[in-house]
Structure formats: C-alpha cells, structure tokens
Image (spheres, rainbow, N blue to C red):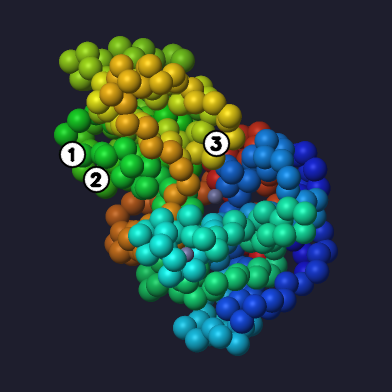
Amino acid sequence: MKALTFQGKEKITFETVSDPKIESAGDVIIKMTSCAICGSDLHVYHEREKGIDRGTAMGHEFAGEIVETGNSVRKLNIGDRVMSPFTTSCGTCFYCQSGLTCRCVRSQLFGWVEKGHGLHGGQAEYVRVPLAESTLMKIPEGIREEEALLLGDVMSTGFFCARQAEVKETGTYVVVGCGPVGLMAVLGAVNLRARNIIAIDTVPERLAKARDFGATALHALNDPVTDMIRDLTEGRGADGVMEAVGSYQAVRTAIDLVRPGGVVASVGVCNDDHLAFSPVEAYNKNLTYKIGRCPARYMMEQLIPLVQEKKYNIASIFTHRMKLEEGAAGYTVFSGRQDHCLKVLLRN
Ligand SMILES: [Zn+2]
Ligand SMILES: [Zn+2]
C-alpha cells in the first residue's frame, strides 16, 4: 500500500510500504477513507519530537471502513464505517474505567513507531487498529466523516480543555491560540454557556473564525489584551485560561492573564523540560494548573449527540481538501500557514 511517511526533518513522502496485517486476535484492518493533518503531526514534521523511525506512516486522525477482523473481534464487522481516537485503549483497565482513556495501560499512539515498535498512522491507504473493539467507534447516524475526524482529536481536545478550565456561565474565560484545538476550545466554552470568551492569536483568519464561533477575538500584539481582560474582571484577571498551543510563551501568557485562584488548562503537546512559571508565582496566585493529553475515546462518546444535533459548524475549520497522494504538499501548506490554511483533510 501507499502511505505518507516520515523521512526526516520536514520531509514527508508518499511511499510504498508493507501492507498492515492482523497481528493479534483483537486487531482490525481498516481501509482509510479520510484523514487529517494535525498540529501535533507538525511536531514530528519539524523534528521537535525525537525518536520516530524513518518510514513511519504519519497521522492519527482517520476514519474508514473495516476490511478485515481478528479472530476475537465480535462487535465490529467487515464493512462497518468507523472513527478512531488518536490512541488505542483497552476499555477495561483502571484508566479506561475512570475516563482517562489516554492513559490506558495498553495505549499506543497512531503514527509513532520507534526502534521498530509502535503503530503506523492513519495517513495511509490501510491502517491496523489493535484493541479495535474498545478503540474504534462505528460512525453513528447523522455524523459525516469529516466530523468524525474532528471527534477523534481536535474537537474532543478543545472541549476537554474547556472542561479542564472549569468554564461556567459567569466569569471571563480566555483561549490562548486559535488553531484548530483553540477554536474547538472556544466552542467548548460556548457549549458550557460562558458569556465572556476572549480568544487570542495573531493570525487574522483564525481570529475571524474565533469570532464566528462566539468569542471576542483579540490580536495578541495589536490589542491591549491585558487591559481589556482587567476591565472585564474589575482588575482581577481571567477566571480560566485555555492554553491550546503547548509553547513556553503561550503558557506564560496564560499565567499572566489568569486571576488569583483561577485555572489554567494546557492541552497542546508539550515537549518542554521546565514550567513557564515558578512555584512561588503559582503559590502567590493560588494557581490551579492542569496539563495533559485529552482522553479522546472517552470524550468522543460524550460529544456524539452534540455533533448529531449540528449545533456548531465544526467542519468549517477544514480549509483545504486534497487527495492522500497530495499529502506532502498538504504538510507544506499547513506548516507554512500558506493560503490561509487552518486544517487539511485528505481523502483516499
Ligand atoms: Zn491530532
Ligand atoms: Zn485501558
């Protein structure tokens, strides 16, 4: 089969790789029909995360049709259309049972093979999915495939971020970074009925989208962000900040904007060795700082009814649609934010 493979820093190629095979009784093979490029794929692309083998099929946002099932698979059948979270999960361990599916003891991340071990990704014609019955979900009635892709990661992550930031109807909430996850965090806050949502970025079209979704959009450099938030909160600062970037600077901004006793929630992939704030700063602010990967499998289940209702036009964040074979160009466009690119959908 063919797949978009990692070949070194900023080098993704559409290559022939070996076909995935059933390796365990709980595996299925799916024929990928659509997939997306994620901001966290860019960490790999730019080699900010080390260790991935060359030749690894990229990607962890995908949907498709089951074409082969392992011997123990009962709840899924050949021909089922399925969506996937970005990691596998067993459904029975302590973490799966408590809703932290991202920390499943048998969890594997799609699109990460290191020293020959791991899972190839979804930006490929076929994908092997281990623990298939507890990882995959059949795409329910009324959910389009492109919406299913967003459920598998960025929508779940954005809504998780809003939940982590303890967003309520009253109060002032800030989203730092209006990429796909930040935009979904805006919707997550809207969905928790927050009346005052401030979204911060520097890219005009991202700010326009945040405004569309219901936030007051502020340019990080051109608008007096700190003063405006102080004005809204009698000088206190934001009650909660959703940090959707993962960089030192974004966390720093979040810490500066949150009020004493407030919450900062970080969901962007983090590769830093040190925090962007000191213990004394946290102490003096009575800060609550929450950080970590979204339990996407758990969140997907919660969010399905909302997507079925079509309450929000989530798929409008896809600005570019291409064929899988054109995916290398998709990486260039997405990473360079060329042509106002916000998110790339690839079809097989
Ligand atoms: Zn993703
Ligand atoms: Zn588990």
Residue pictured at 26% horizontal, 47% vertical: 191
One can see residue 106 in this view: yes
* Residue corresponding to mark 1: 169
The quadrant of the picture occupied by the N terminus is: bottom right
Mark 3 neighbour class, 10 Å CA radius: few under 14, some 14 to 19, many 20 or more: some
Circles 1 and 3 in contact, beta carbons < 8 Å: no
Between the C-alphas of marks 1 and 3, the distance is 29 Å
Residue pictured at 47% horizontal, 71% vertical: 134
First-in-chain label (1 vs 3)? 1
* Residue corresponding to mark 2: 192
In front of the other: 207 or 279: 279
Pinpoint residue 120: horizontal percent, then vertical percent.
69, 61
* Residue corresponding to mark 3: 270
Image position of 74 with respect to 303: above or below: below
Q: Seen in the image, is 200 located left or right of residue 192?
A: right
Pinpoint residue 253: horizontal percent, then vertical percent.
43, 21
